[in-house]
Image (cartoon, grey):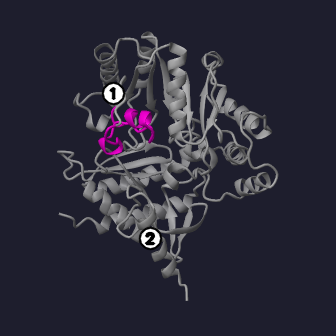
Amino acid sequence: MVTTATITEDVKAGHDEYLFPVVKPYYRDPLVIAEASGVDVIDTEGRQYLDFFAGILTTSIGHCHPEVVQRVREQVGRLGHTSTLYLTENQVNVARKLAGITPGRLTRSFFTNSGTEAVETAVMLASIYTGRSEIIALRHAYSGRSILASNITAHASWRPLASSVAGIKHALSPYLYRSPFGEQSEEEAAESFARDLEEAIVTTTSGQPAAFIAESIQGVGGFIVPPRGYFQRAAEIIRRYGGVFIADEVQAGFGRTGEKWFGIEHWGVEPDIMVMAKGIASGFPVAATVTTDEIAAAWTGKTISTYGGTPVSMAATEATLDVMIREDTPHRSAERGAQLRRGLDDLATEHAWIGEVRGMGLMQALELVEDWKSKEPSPRRAVALLEAAKEEGLLVGLGGLHNQVVRLGPSMLVSEAQVDDAIERLGRACRQIDSMA
């Protein structure tokens, strides 16, 4: 007789036997998810969990939102695929909706399947437009898994050996909690980090960079929020040297940071190019690179993305955007994010090993330390908290250079009661690891 336990063990054994060893799941005893709805997920043995990591901030309006499911079902039965050699209504509708919410003059879209591809497209476009090839990125950045994107990434553990790409330089991350400049006001810190960016340009490049690329809030880096004024200065600097500013909104986009559709808007900066993915389509493989008429027109050579803009994925994207706009996800994220932040701040007052609480909207993090004064990173506590939260039926994520940051980014349609529930579960998990020496 086949039992739920048998299914679970068969999946785990099959994963170990047939997938690359590098495909590593969370937890000592990996979770096998069978179904999900909203913020609730159920494993193959019937246990239910509250999902506060949302497939790495991807199921942006919850798992299996009924409007997305319905639109995809209708589309897949009518037209499953055609390349961009032909026109489809869905692709145009999505591009039009994006033009309505992206800042300023960013109205031209190119669709691909992942954040990695969106970054590749953006960097290639910047190089074509400027006639240059050098790229400035930030330390603690994460940009994807291609050779180019992994070289823009600034975490050794995410950069495979023998994959070096010339012409990519890294400035200091505007990471206030671990700033090398000591105690400064936000404005002073913004200027210090901006000066480092300019120094990186004049000392490590030809002085003629193609672009500066940065996440508006660094995701894998541990939800690092830059000081006020940093992006204004960074955009001014890269443009003064003839390059363009690429804003990475793969994790921070679509209202997640609260009150604004995109993270970069909090600093009043209009990028030259913007990339987005993850939450754009509720888990379907969609990404977009969005730019101005002038920059888009510079790409005159042939290019194509076979699955970019394919009808089924565009149906999921259009349905997701319709729900986001109707439900006003920027406002909802601000409200529920403030509630979540209050709960996390309360936990920080109870537990000395929570070094910092940071984030914006429904993009919040706890940086865990061995000692509050020394700020020594504590990946062991972060892993222990991840496991303890699972025991309490709460799914969260990890991040940070040393895996010392616990990340929370639930569906932007999460309810007030669900946020309270998550805080209570996380509090119990925190108390489980208080005894760690």
Residue beneath the point at 43% across and 48% down: 364
- Where is residue 291, by image quadrant? top right
Query: Is-magenta flag for residue 145?
Result: yes
Q: Amino acid at mark 2?
A: Lys
Q: Is residue 434 magenta?
A: no
Q: Is residue 306 in view from this perspective? A: yes
Q: Position of residue 379 (x, y in %)?
A: 27, 54
Check the picture and name the quadrant holding the C terminus: bottom left
Under mark 1, the amino acid is: His
**In contact (CB < 8 Å): disc 1 and disc 2:** no
> Which label was assigned to residue 12?
2
Secondary structure found at label 2:
helix
Q: CA distance from mark 1 to mark 2?
A: 39 Å
- Residue 31: percent from the left, percent from the top? 45, 68
Q: Is residue 254 above or below residue 7?
A: above
What is the secondary structure assignment of the residue under circle 1? Answer: strand
Our reading of the magenta stretch's main secondary structure is loop
Q: Residues within 10 Å of mark 2 (few under 14, many from 20)?
A: some
User: Visible in this render: residue 268?
Assistant: no
Residue at the image position 43 percent from the left and 42 percent from the top? 219
Residue at numbered disc 1: 170
- Residue range highlighted in magenta: 139-162
Q: Position of residue 376 (x, y in %)?
A: 20, 47
